Image (cartoon, rainbow, N blue to C red):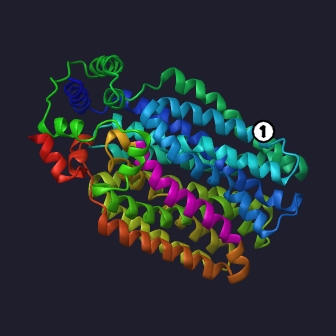
Amino acid sequence: MHEHHAALIAARMQRIPTTRYTWFIVLLAAGSLIVEALDIGALGIILPIIKNVMALTPSDTGLLAASSAVGIVVGMIPAGRLADRFGRKRLLLGGCLWFASMTMLAAFSPNFTVLLALRALSGLGMAPAFIMPYSIVSEFVSQTSRTAFAGVLETALGIGYLLPPVLGLFILPNFTPEIAWRIFLVVAGLPVLYVWVIWKYLPESPRWLSRVGRIADADEVLLALERRVERLLGRALPAPEIVHETVVAVASVPQASTLQAVWLVWTGPYLLRTVSMIIGAVGTFSMFYLGVYYIPSLLVERHIALGNALLFTIIISASQIPGKLLNGLCAELFGRKAVYLVFGLGAVISSAMFGFATTTVSMVVWGSLLLFSAAGTAPSFKMWYAELYPTPIRATGQATVESIGGRLVGGVVWTFLFPILVSARGLEMTMMIAGLLGVLGIIFVVSFVPETRRRTVESLEVTATAPEQTLAVAR
């Protein structure tokens, strides 16, 4: 009986077209990413100041730059599992409240050790806030526009990463270095007030509610959604049609325990795609983190004044936005795989060329192309690995890929090693290594990850399920 109701909820969701209310839900989720990107990008702006004020070594600098990513790694898989058990909305709310509060507390750090610890703790809240918007969009939005809306989510991140250098221009020159970075962190944490907006207006996913047995709650949320859509359309929605693949999908992957869910993403039909996406995430995120955390410092080290470095950082950061929008639209038209290949190669080439840039203009040009491509890869890539896992383990699968590949290797290990490698081997060789990681990721993702363009969530679940299990359910 439960499986029938869950299949009916899925069928009702599949017939809902994109409307203004779809945009409303997506933009609500996107707002949380603006808040998060502001928080993450804040450190890159104040890092040159903190290096001087606290007399940091290259190792200290790498540790501080990687600190929030450490928290993300530690928190992401538990956050994904908690989201699969307790809901997308609750985890998004808790995550935003946590990381913004830790950022404001970090402003009052008496020394480097406390600052390092608070930045790491902030990452625990960033973990759910990074993956929940993609889970929400993948479960609310039509299969014909998922990556286009993922482009909107990623554009929100781009806007968020653009805000820190803009704020830096207004805050940093007006205070002494010892106090400027503290005021900057307080301002970066103020958007915690957005938590109330999410709590008030963002609905929980009916697909998730139905799959954990909360059929009445799913029906209530979905009924309100259907009424809103019908008012916007001026007509009734067509009757839901429960197709065979929906029934198979609902029955094939039941609600799993924590250990079962974590284990499932490493077994059978999911193993190769999990490994391939992790390797792809290493290449993509390692190049992205260079742009977010180190470009201001690299510009300052080229004897560019901090004010000018912030202006150039704004230009470079802004390049993410058209890249993300273009990627999301193109992935819907041409498929995830082809678009990932093109953007990935662009990031590899730009990474290598940035390392050999000798003038301010060439650094800005290649830095802009690097973030255009590396950050621009994100809409199709992140939505892609959200689509690869069934609803009961979707957030767990997302968290596994992003925490290990994107945050642990790309965000922690690589971010920590970067200033050390630059000091020992030079920027040219270090950026070449980043490019090689990108090439490795492209090879694995393009070779072993299936295309998911314009497929319903349920049809993708059937494809992913082991043949013998699907056959048993079908019988």
> Is residue 400 shown left or right of residue 35?
left
Q: Dominant secondary structure of the magenta stretch?
A: helix
Left or right relative to 223: residue 316: right
Q: Which residues are magenta?
A: 395-419
x%, y% of residue 371?
54, 62
Quadrant where the N terminus sits is: top left
- Amino acid type at circle 1 is Leu
Q: Residue at x 65, y 28 (%)?
A: 193
Q: Position of residue 91 (x, y in %)?
A: 52, 34
Helix, strand or loop at label 1? It is helix
Residue shown at 33%/35% (left/top)? 255
Task: Identify which residue, 213 or 242, lies in the foreground.
Answer: 213
Label 1 crowd bin: few (<14), some (14–19), many (20+), radius 10 Å: some
Quarter of the image with the C terminus in it: top left
Q: Residue at x 71, y 34 (%)?
A: 190
Describe residue 351's horizontal placement relative to residue 461 as left or right: right
| Residue designated by label 1 | 105
User: Is residue 450 rendered to the left or right of residue 28?
Assistant: left
User: Compared to 8, does 305 lie above or below?
Assistant: below
Residue closest to the eye, 53 or 184: 53
